[in-house]
Every structure is written in C-alpha cells, then in structure tokens.
Amino acid sequence: MKILFAGIIARYPFGGVTWCSLMYLLGLRALGHDVFYIEDTGECVYDPIQNTRSLDPRYGTSYIHGALEPFGLGECWAFVNYDGSYHGRSAADVRRFCADADLFLNLSGGSWFWRDEYARIPRTAFIDSDPAFTQLAIAKAEPWYVDFFKRFDCLFTFGSNIGTARSPVPVGDFVWRKTWQPVTLDQWQAREPAGDRFTTVMTWQIESFTDVGGNKDQEFVQYIDLPARTRQPFELAVNGPRALLHAHGWSTADAMQVSRTPSAYRDFIQRSKAEFGVAKHTYVSTRSGWFSDRTECYLASGRPALVQDTGWTAHLPSGEGLLAFSSPDEALAGIDAINSDYPRHARRALEVAREHFDSKRILTRLVEDACAR
C-alpha cells in the first residue's frame, strides 16, 4: 500500500515531535508499505538557532532531511513553505506519488490543506494527538475548520475516553476512534545503564489552543513541593520558569537543547531512572484518557513511568512498570514503589510497551480501520 503521511517535523523541529512522525513512517514501512512524508501547514518553520519563526525554511528542511536520511527516507519527503514553494521533492513528484496512493494519514495537522492530489487519495484519516483541545476547538470553530475534519473518512485520537461517558468533551456528529502513538521498539533499546533521576521533557505552556484549555503549569503547581518530601532526585527538561523550579528543589535542563535532535532526546530519556510526568490541565480535567508518546518511549527503553492519570487507567495497566497518580501523596507512593524493586519495574515497563504500543500492532489496526468500508 502507498501511504502519504503528513506531520509537523519542521513546524516543531524537536526530538519528541520528530519521533512521533518518524515512528509512523518506520513502522508503516516495516509492515511493507511505501511511505512518503509531506508537511503542508501553511505556516513558517521555527528556527531554534534564531529563536523565531522564519520565512526562510532552510533550518526546517535541513532538519527534516537530517531526521529521515539515516533511516533511508532522505528522498521520501517534501515540505511546502508558507509561500507555496516546495522543498525536498518537487510538487510534481508529490502529485505522482499521490496519483496512485491508497491512504492519506494526517498527524496533528501536518497539512491544513485539501489539495486536489490529497483529496483524490481513496482513503483519508486524521490522527489527533491533542484530545479534548481538538474537540473543544471544533465545537467553537468557524465553518471552514469543521468542514476540514468532515472531509476525512476516519478520525483517530490519542484520547481513549473521547466520545464516551467517561469524558464530558463534546464531539457533535464526529466519531473518534481510539489509537495510541506507535513505538518502533528496536529504536528504543537502551544503550546505557539507567541513571539516578526521575526525569521528563515538558512544555510549561503551549502556544496553541489558548482559548479552549489549560496547560501543564496549572497541574504542576500541585506537585511543586514534591522534592522536599522525598530523597529521590528529579530533573526536568523544561522551557518554563527554571528559577522557580530550582527554588523548590527541582533540577532543570534546557528542554530545547535536550530535544535539539532525535538522538539527543532519546539519550536524555535513556539516561533517566524513570519518568515523572504531569499532564496538561485540560487532559486531566476532561478525563480525556490521553497518554503521552513520550511516556511510551520511556517504557520502551525499560524505564518505569510514574505519570498523572488522565483517565488512561481505564485502558492500560497501572501498578508495575507504569504507575498512575492523581495527588502528591500518590506520586510519593509511586516513587517509593519503583525504588523498592527497580529491576522488576524496569522489566515490566518494557513488557507494557511491547504489549500495548508496539508499532506492528498499533499500525496494523489503524490501517485496517482507516481502509475499512
């Protein structure tokens, strides 16, 4: 099957976002599919060297090539700049691929256009990585935004409770199928021993969906005094108020540096002892069932994860390797549990990744569902 896959690697040129798209591409290729990456958001790239949006797409296009080329995908991508110019493969090459493509997968708004060549692909699917935010935005959106989603044959979401009685998020006439971020397990085999710190990579506040939901800062304040209550050291790779966090006992690193490349991001995760992860307020307050792609990477590296419950515990195991918390006391109990038998939790973490997030399982079902008539 020929699959056109849209992602946001240049729009957000950081390791975690890159791995999201990369693991779809690698996982689909491993299943025997012919894949091509397209990025067509109508927006400028972010250039972290200049720390600004740039009209010049060279940082983003170089970044895409650098991320895909080591995996044999260096000739399988195209980036459409805000001005309509094509980089990587040409517009004609994209049209030729699309002419006999079977499936168009759009992750996180990797394309906000329905160009004729995309629209003619027989089956189309959108994959929502921001559950609750996306549905709340649709509920209050202008007609063009609603119509954009209506044109897909199938809609998927990482919010396992969206559209069910467990979550109050309105979905209207849309049907959202449940999926998880696929993980290509071979790429996450740990290459060095675990460190001594519970870590995470986090964005304090996001720039999108500002009118429909709350960010991670609203949840984190509940846990800001946690280092004073345990001997366990923490390190946050964060783009937030590092002085405030230091004052409360958190060690920090620059999230942009930690995430500058896919390999740097992976190295940071694999140097960790475990993850300590707080979710965005909207994920928690709506009981969306969102589960982090980053957490999946910790698990696939054999690193236990202690992460806030957004309702995901209705669908995934919690207690060994992967532990949930909903209060500071529960977080402390989870830290003690992991430290009391770390080898067992590390083994179980990898087992959870294999059982629930293996790209072979996730993508086989996603393609089958997307192509079902």
Image (cartoon, helix red, strand yellow):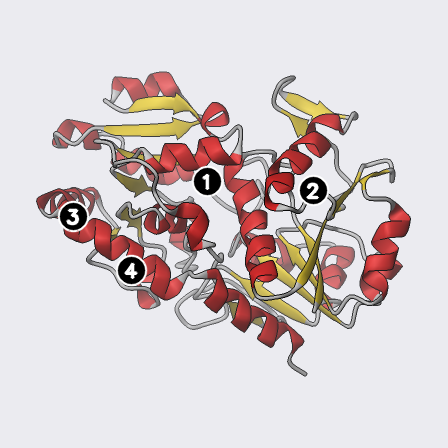
The percent position of residue 309, horizontal first and vertical second, equals: 31, 54
Local packing at callout 1 (Cα closer than 10 Å; few below 14, some 14-19, many 20+) is some
The span from disc 4 to disc 1 (Cα, nearest Å) is 31 Å
Q: Which residue is mark 2?
A: 74
The quarter of the picture where residue 241 lies is top left
Instruction: Say the numbered circle drawn on residue 343.
Output: 3
The percent position of residue 117, horizontal first and vertical second, equals: 86, 60
Which amino acid type is marked by label 3? Pro
Is 319 placed left or right of 61 in the picture? left
Q: Which residue is mark 4?
A: 351
Front-most of residues 215 and 71: 71
Q: Which residue is mark 1?
A: 215
The span from disc 4 to disc 2 (Cα, nearest Å) is 32 Å
First of labels 4, 1 by sequence position: 1
Which amino acid type is marked by label 1? Asn
Which amino acid type is marked by label 4? Glu
Instruction: Say the numbered circle drawn on residue 373.
Output: none
Foreground disc of the pair 3, 1: 3
First of labels 3, 4 by sequence position: 3
